[in-house]
Image (cartoon, rainbow, N blue to C red):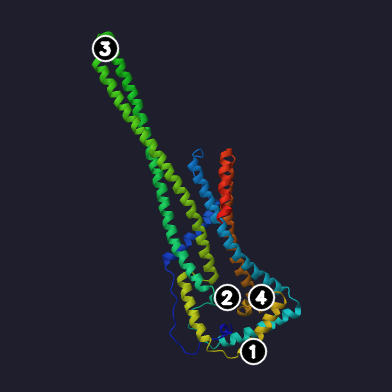
Amino acid sequence: MLFRLFGFGKKKKKQITPPEEPEDLRKEREEESEEVDRILKDRVYFEKENVDLKDDNARITYLTHLRDAILEGKHQCEEVKFEYGRVTSYLKDIQLIDQAEEEDHNRICDSARRIVDLTEMRRSIRQKRYHISDDQRKALDRFEDDVQHDIERLLEFEDMQVRIRADLRRLSGEKTFLAGEKKEINRKQATLRGISKALTVILLLAMVSLGVLLGVWKVDITVPFVATAAFAFLVVALIMTEARKNRMEMVIAEKKENKAVALTNRVKIKYVNNVRALEYLCAKYRVSGATELDFVNSQYQQAKREWARQREGTIQIEENHDILIRTLKKIGVRDREIWFSQAKALVDPSEMVEVRHDLNTRRQKLREQLDYNTGVMTECLNEMDRIRLKKPEYEADVERILAQVGELK
């Protein structure tokens, strides 16, 4: 761990500029964050499907969609709670340090101050050639074991984000198309009703005319009557056929629309969780994405190899490190090693404020993600309760589907 305190080397080399995030990607990220905020602001976690509950298959399918949403929310909550516990543990350690007895507090400050002074002395002789900010370096110091895994996660989340956005656009287009299709079917039905009314009027006029011919002029109306009846029968048959066809198309369109709504719900849940996970990892390492994190990590690894060759004055640092760790252990601090790389925060109140702010920001992001998934589960359970109260047989279906939540977790 002591290599973290040493300089970058004495040979001056060509500086490497970190890659800048493309403008279009930056705008996309901002739009995604704004869209997620709108979703959360609206407090609409789950869009209800238009389902005919009397249809057994449709009802079971809808309950299954609700169950899947609950399972997804439950899985996300479990992951978030674990990370939330780690962040809360760091905040509790800070509280223990603040409340330490005067003797222990002075020992912590003295050893931390000597560590900071030795660190600053070595930093003053190193030439800056690695584009890593202090915040990024501190993050890599603290999460060095996790960084490679987090790079892979970021790449996975970014790739998933592209696919999710494509799915949302496709589903939105499909819902718009189906709405237009239903509107067109209704227009056709209205046209058929108009034709039916017009045909009725024409037939009545024809019958009245034939009656006049028969009653007044005693004309034989057998042929005209048969022709009129045949024409009316043919037109009515065509109208009924088209009306039946339109009804079938409307049923199919509504089923497709329900399926699109169900898929949209699932994609929205994944979308919000994916964006929140991306934002959390970017905030964790102070980067804009996987590309920058990979670059910063590669620079950090190069610097580490150089620091390892400059371990001068390690005895004093090691002594103060041992004093600091022993004292922190004495007062009950759990995560003691991280304070070695954050010794400045132990002697500089403004630095400690920044550490608290960072932890509170991370915890707030986790809490927002936890609240969102809790909201999803609550709305799904409320929807199940609404269905449960409709009929006893519905209640049995709901109980059976809810039982699967415990079995599948």
- Judged by depth in the image, the label closer to the viewer, 4 or 3, is 3
- Classify residue 203 as left or right of residue 321: left
Residue type pointed to by label 2: Arg
Which residue bears the numbered disc 4?
Answer: 349
The front one of 367 and 24 is: 367
Density class for disc 3 (Cα within 10 Å; few <14, some 14-19, many ≥20) is some
The front one of 215 and 407 is: 407
**Residue 232 placement (x, y as % from top left):** 30, 23
Mark 4 secondary-structure assignment:
helix
Placement of 378 over or under 2, stated as above or below = above
Q: CA distance from mark 3 to mark 2?
A: 103 Å
Mark closest to the chain's N terminus, 3 or 2: 2
Mark closest to the chain's N terminus, 1 or 3: 3
Mark closest to the chain's N terminus, 4 or 3: 3
Task: Please tell me which residue is depicted at 71% across the width and 72% down the height of the picture.
Answer: 96
Residue type pointed to by label 4: Pro
Mark 1 secondary-structure assignment:
helix
Which residue bears the numbered disc 1?
Answer: 316
- Marker disc for residue 142: 2
Mark closest to the chain's N terminus, 4 or 2: 2
- Classify residue 128 as left or right of residue 378: left
Residue type pointed to by label 1: Gln
- Judged by depth in the image, the label closer to the viewer, 4 or 2, is 2
The quadrant holding residue 321 is bottom right
Task: Please tell me which residue is depicted at 27% across the width and 20% down the height of the picture.
Answer: 228
- Marker disc for residue 282: none
Q: CA distance from mark 4 to mark 3?
A: 109 Å
Mark closest to the chain's N terminus, 4 or 1: 1
Residue type pointed to by label 3: Leu
The front one of 134 and 275 is: 275
Mark closest to the chain's N terminus, 1 or 2: 2
Density class for disc 2 (Cα within 10 Å; few <14, some 14-19, many ≥20) is some
